[in-house]
C-alpha cells in the first residue's frame, strides 16, 4: 500500500506485484477529512479511513511519502501529523513501514528525481496500464509510492536496518 499523506486529502493506493514483474492496480482513492472539524477529530477520521483500507486490502507493507520542507509551516505540520497517523495505523497491524522521499518516488517511476506531478501521473498510468489517469493527484501520488515500495521498499528497509545497526555498535 502506498500513502500520500495529507490532512484534507490523503491518497491511498494498493498495488500488487513483486520485483521483476509488472505491478497491478488493486484499488486507489483518497481519505478525506472535513476542514470544519477540530484537528483531533480530523486525525481520528483519517485514522478510521486508513484503518478501513488496511482492513479491507490487507497489504503486506506500507510505503509513505516522507514529508518535505515547504514554505507553509501549517501545511507541513498537517502533512507530518497525517504521516504519523498513517505510520501508526500500519504499525498497529504489524506491517513494515518505509518512508520514501518525493524525489525517490519521482526517480522510481519516471527516472528523474525532479519530475513534475504531471510526469509522475503520466508514468504511473503507463506502468499500471490504466485506461485513464488516476484522480485526484493525491491518488496518483499514492500509487507512485506503492510502486516505489514494491521496487525499492526492501532495499530501503535493509539500508535503514544497516544504519541503525551501525549506530548501535558505537
Image: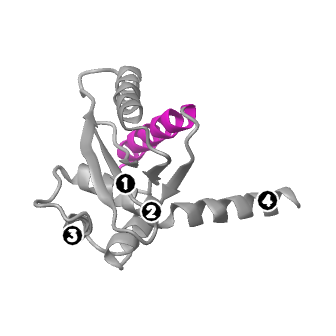
Graded by Cα atoms within 10 Å as few (under 14), some (14 to 19) or many (20 or more), the crowding at tag 3 reads some
Residue 100: x and y in percent read 47, 59
Which callout, 2 or 3, points at the residue further toward the start of the chain?
Answer: 2
Q: Give the range drawn in magenta.
A: 72-92
* Residue 70 shows up from this direction: no
* Distance between the alpha carbons at the discs numbered 4 and 3: 38 Å
Which callout, 4 or 3, points at the residue further toward the start of the chain?
Answer: 3
When asked about the image quadrant of residue 134, the answer is: bottom left
As drawn, 160 above or below 49: below
Q: Is mark 2 on a helix, strand or loop?
A: loop
Q: Which of 51 and 6 is in front in this view?
A: 51
Marks 1 and 3: in contact by CB < 8 Å? no
Q: What element carries label 4?
A: helix
Q: Look at mark 2 in the image and give the residue it sits on.
A: 18
Q: Look at mark 4 in the image and give the residue it sits on.
A: 165
Residue 127: x and y in percent read 26, 68
Looking at the image, which residue is at 72% across and 63% down? 163
Which callout, 2 or 4, points at the residue further toward the start of the chain?
Answer: 2
* Distance between the alpha carbons at the discs numbered 4 and 1: 30 Å
Q: Look at mark 1 in the image and give the residue it sits on.
A: 16
Q: Look at mark 3 in the image and give the residue it sits on.
A: 126
* Distance between the alpha carbons at the discs numbered 2 and 1: 7 Å
Residue occupying the far right of the picture: 170
The rendered magenta stretch, by its main secondary structure, is classed as helix
In the image, is 50 to the left or to the right of 36?
right
Graded by Cα atoms within 10 Å as few (under 14), some (14 to 19) or many (20 or more), the crowding at tag 4 reads few
Question: Where does the C terminus fall, quadrant-wise?
Answer: bottom right
* Distance between the alpha carbons at the discs numbered 2 and 4: 27 Å
Amino acid at each position: 500500500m502506498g500513502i500520500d499523506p495529507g490532512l484534507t486529502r490523503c491518497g491511498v493506493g494498493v498495488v500488487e506485484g513483486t520485483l521483476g514483474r509488472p505491478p497491478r492496480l488493486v484499488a486507489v482513492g483518497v481519505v478525506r477529512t472535513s476542514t470544519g472539524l477540530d484537528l483531533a477529530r480530523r486525525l481520528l477520521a483519517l485514522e478510521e479511513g486508513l484503518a478501513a483500507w488496511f482492513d479491507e486490502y490487507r497489504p503486506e507493507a506500507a510505503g509513505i511519502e516522507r514529508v518535505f520542507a515547504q514554505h507553509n509551516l501549517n501545511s507541513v505540520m498537517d502533512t507530518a501529523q497525517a504521516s504519523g497517523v498513517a505510520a501508526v495505523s500500519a504499525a498497529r497491524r504489524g506491517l513494515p513501514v518505509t518512508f520514501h522521499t518525493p524525489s525517490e518516488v519521482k526517480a522510481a517511476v519516471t527516472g528523474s528525481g525532479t519530475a513534475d506531478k504531471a510526469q509522475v501521473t503520466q508514468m504511473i498510468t503507463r506502468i499500471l496500464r490504466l485506461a485513464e489517469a488516476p484522480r485526484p493527484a493525491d491518488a496518483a501520488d499514492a500509487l507512485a509510492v506503492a510502486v516505489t515500495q514494491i521496487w525499492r521498499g526492501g532495499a530501503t528497509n535493509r539500508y535503514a536496518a544497516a544504519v541503525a545497526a551501525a549506530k548501535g555498535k558505537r
